Amino acid sequence: MDGLLLIDKPEGWTSHDVVAKLRGILKMKAIGHAGTLDPFATGLLVLGVGKGTKRLTALVGVDKEYVASVRMGATSDTFDKEGVIVEQNVSKEPTRNEVEKALDKFRGGYEQLAPLHSAKKIGGKKLYDLARAGKATEEMRPMKQVKIDKIEVVEYEWPNLTIDVKCGSGTYIRSLADDIGRELGVGGYCVELRRTKVGEFDVENALPIEGLTMDIAAKHIL
């Protein structure tokens, strides 16, 4: 069995969990994935099976699309719902127009700081390890110019904002959620994140990992 397999990653699973599960189902070790998803995130994970692992290199750097739910009026040290949540004192709730104006700052792209709780390395040590040890500082967050081709408001009803984002590779949607909250002056963090597209591939064509069998996988190999 050689090719690509599209999996809809469930919440709570790491990307490696999906690979490990698939190795057990397909009885083979040559399986890899393109583009890690955080455990709290769901959605499209493109996996290479057998000789298909060589095709994963072509997916490095491709654009991705996400639907993210941002909870405003609070912050998280991890920029997502799994961190320490601190409620903010908000005297005035942003209007829809104010939200759109804030999003304008990020449309096209901007210089983004990676989260402290990320796998970026400083001095050979991963940032999230330093953060957990209480040794990470804001100054350690690496900055990168990221590409944001689209940010559309799907729904907004304070304190919940849902956005559709098309972005370049290496963009942290968690950081974007935090940055939007900062721009509005009310705080914000990501409560739900779903990857819907990786390059030409769409989550609508992905298989659930639960209930997956070798026969089903064989019929959907690309």
Image: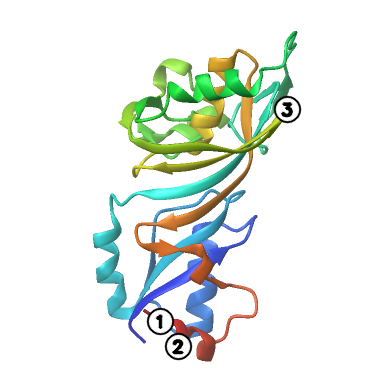
- The answer to whether marks 3 and 1 mark residues whose Cβ atoms lie closer than 8 Å is no
Disc 2 is placed on an element classified as helix
Numbered tag placed on residue 153 in the rendering? none
- The answer to whether marks 1 and 2 mark residues whose Cβ atoms lie closer than 8 Å is yes
Which percent across, then down, holds residue 81? 67, 37
In front: label 3 or label 1 = 3
Label 2 CA crowd tier, 10 Å (few <14, some 14–19, many 20+): some
Real-space CA distance between mark 1 and mark 2, rounded to the nearest whole angstrom: 5 Å
Q: For residue 110, what is the image quadrant?
A: top left
Disc 1 is placed on an element classified as loop
Furthest residue to the bottom?
A: 215
Q: Quadrant of the N terminus?
A: bottom left
Picture residue at 43% right of the left edge, 21% below the top: 105
Residues 63 and 189: in front is 63
Instruction: Establish if 97 lies above or below 121.
Output: above
Numbered tag placed on residue 221 in the rendering? 1
Instruction: Establish if 101 lies above or below 83.
Output: above
Disc 3 is placed on an element classified as loop
Real-space CA distance between mark 3 and mark 2, rounded to the nearest whole angstrom: 44 Å
Which percent across, then down, holds residue 208? 59, 72
User: What's the residue type where badge 2 is placed?
Assistant: Ala
Which percent across, then down, holds residue 34? 37, 59
Numbered tag placed on residue 218 in the rendering? 2
Picture residue at 59% right of the left edge, 18% below the top: 98
User: What's the residue type where badge 1 is placed?
Assistant: Ile
